[in-house]
Amino acid sequence: MHLRLIICTAVAVGALASCGGSKPGAPLATAMKPPPTAPSSAALNPLLADWTGPYGGVPAFDQVQVEHFKPALDQVMTATVAAAKTIANAAEPATFDNTIAALESATRSFDRLHSIFNVWSGGLNTEAFQQVERDMAPKLAAFGDEIHQNAALFARIEAVYRQRNQTGLSAEQQRLVWKVHNDFVRAGAKLSVSAKQRVGAINQQLAALFTQFSQNVLADENERFLVIDSEEALVGLPRSLRDAARAAAESKTMAGKWVIANTRSSVEVFLTTSQRRDLREQVWRAFVDRGDHGGPQDNNSIVTQILRLRAERAKLLGYPTHAHLRLDDTMAKTPERAMALLEAVWAPAVARVAEEVADMQAIADVEQAGIRIEPWDYRFYAEKVRKQKFDLDHELLKPYLQLAKLREGMFWVAGELFGLAFRPVTDVPVFHPDVRVWEVVDKATGAHRGLWYFDPYARPAKQSGAWMSAYRVQERFESEVTPLVSNNCNFIPGTPGEPVLVSWDDATTLFHEFGHGLHGLLSDVSYPSLAGTAVCRDYVELPSQLLEHWLSTPEVLQRFAIHYQTGAPIPKELVERIKRASTFNQGFSMVEYVSGALVDMKLHLAGDETIDPDEFERTTLAALGMPREIVMRHRTPQFLHIFAGDSYSAGYYSYLWADVLTADGFEAFGEAGGPYDPEVAERLRTHILSAGNTVDPATGYRRFRGRDATIDALLRKRGFAAGAKR
């Protein structure tokens, strides 16, 4: 039952033989399933109908309207709670079949409906849907608590848990029993009635605050932007950004002008290329001040409330702080271990920033710019240093980085490493015209493996950033079910009829999210709660960060980095320059990330202290020795990872934890036959990508690598190891 994961992460805005017990594929008693939806309701509301069509059924995106969500959620939540009560009140003694497996079945309808709710939340977040989010957030939280705090249900779960090693269950079934029991305990199942009621009230308050926080950030991105009136002010900007800015202006009925959207995909390009320092500062300030400029969309008071409620809930659940609660079931286990890793890279990263700033200031002085490097100058002058040191201009790379070709490159990598093939299909409904769909098959046999949806472009009412989601996860305990996986990005749309060109960073993001997608597509487990990406937070980024490495392999670049006009592959000497510059600007990237991870952890270690977010951020960064030329990648009032839901709260460190595994894991390929070594790829597939949460992540990694990971490979990758060149 991955109900807990869904409630925690998405309210706000991701084969073992049976030795006894329930066998994969064994049917459950009808009484264990939610009551069937009345045909009349399903006929009127497509969200209540069974998924039909090819590929085991697909969501009817083309029939869904915003007004369908509230009645559908209300009806399915009522049915799911009734099914859970049936399980709880059964007369028969608790077994794996009639309790744990029954819950897996009972929550399936809600899981699939909620996945569609999340599609609208992330990709179609109109004003009308935002009202639905505000109305439903507390209801969704209460729904989760009603199940997790059901004393009779938990008593049956605990009975199965106590006997899990003595009832002939398979290893996967034992893992599922542990996970369900752990989820219920962490949700407050062992608390007194009064404590349960207070935890439930806190969860409802948090759900509403998460939604408000997310909607405030989206509003700032939609409503606060730079309008440029003259073509002279576009000096330095690449054509792709100029075209996107003109299209954005036209969409806002500002014909003849240019609009620089307040989203990362536009802002970072502008800060890197614009020769107008005054405009760079305006764009930078609008971006870093999202949620932090006073007025009705200011998030500071919301952050204060969220932190207070999280601290209170953690104490009720028996933990000293929210950070201890969140890390208890991760690889890191304790905040102290996570902090130790962050602090290990902080000092070398800050030292590297000093060197980078000195290089940039030297160029500014030679050019007689008469400035001191400021945060809005960093990317602009970093590019000048990159050209000077490595003769590498990222704008020279763009003509070779066509989005469509890079997508083909990702498919090719998946074929070489894991034997997958991708076939475009048009017989599947989509929720927006930008979205395209591919069937995923086994390259050797043609057997169907799933569907991959791709929503690549930025647009109004779409959350910024990039993410993977699963509309349906792989499972087979009742029947064989294949996954429906989506990758979502915010690339700048190109001129109609011309290929979309992306930056090297965007290309890396593309491969990163596809790594998450493969984690979902290659899942090979019996129970949905253990499928795909349903692993602990500091492990889930391993597949995504690992796949980034294949972008820069010669095999991908020579085949798919093709000049959009001439068709010529990227020159080998340019590839060599990319390789030599691979550790360039790592001080900047590490400091902007690690500073955010440290602030996140310290915010959640502060306990019930009343926090002024801006003041806390300033004093914490000052104590750390934060370079004045850099800000956190996600400042506190816009930090969606940690304040639009619980999922990454006290967990932003997880990207670095996973990168230790990533760097170490990729070296396994280098120690063998190279990045496409079939034996290492098979171990990666078997022990990490296909295993989901059926094994402890540390065990899974050791089975893949043959040992635990060390930080040495990360320091080499980032250029921080002794003697490393930058």
Image (cartoon, rainbow, N blue to C red):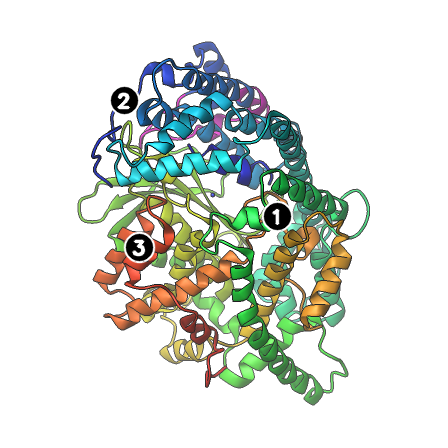
Is label 3 in contact with label 2 (beta carbons under 8 Å)? no
- Quick one: 483 or 507, which is closer to the camera? 483
**Quadrant location, the N terminus:** top left
Distance (Cα) linking label 3 and label 2: 34 Å
Numbered tag placed on residue 83 in the rendering: none
Residue highlighted by disc 2:
27
Quadrant of the rendered image containing residue 219: top right
Amino acid found under the numbered disc labelled 3: Ala
**Left or right relative to 47: residue 280:** right
The answer to whether one can see residue 404 in this image is no
Q: Quick one: which residue is furthest to the bottom in this view?
A: 366
- The percent coordinates of residue 597 (x first, y second) are 59, 59
- Quick one: 403 or 686, which is closer to the camera? 686
| Residue 377 within the segment the image draws in magenta | no
Amino acid found under the numbered disc labelled 1: Pro
SS of the residue under disc 1: loop
Q: Report the span colored magenta.
A: 50-72
- The percent coordinates of residue 398 (x first, y second) are 49, 67
SS of the residue under disc 3: helix
- The percent coordinates of residue 89 (x first, y second) are 43, 15
- Quick one: 390 or 725, which is closer to the camera? 725
Image height of 297 relative to 481, above or below: below
- Could you tell which of marks 2 and 1 lies nearer the N-terminus? 2
Numbered tag placed on residue 320 in the rendering: 1
**Left or right relative to 649: residue 229:** right
Image height of 661 relative to 580, above or below: above
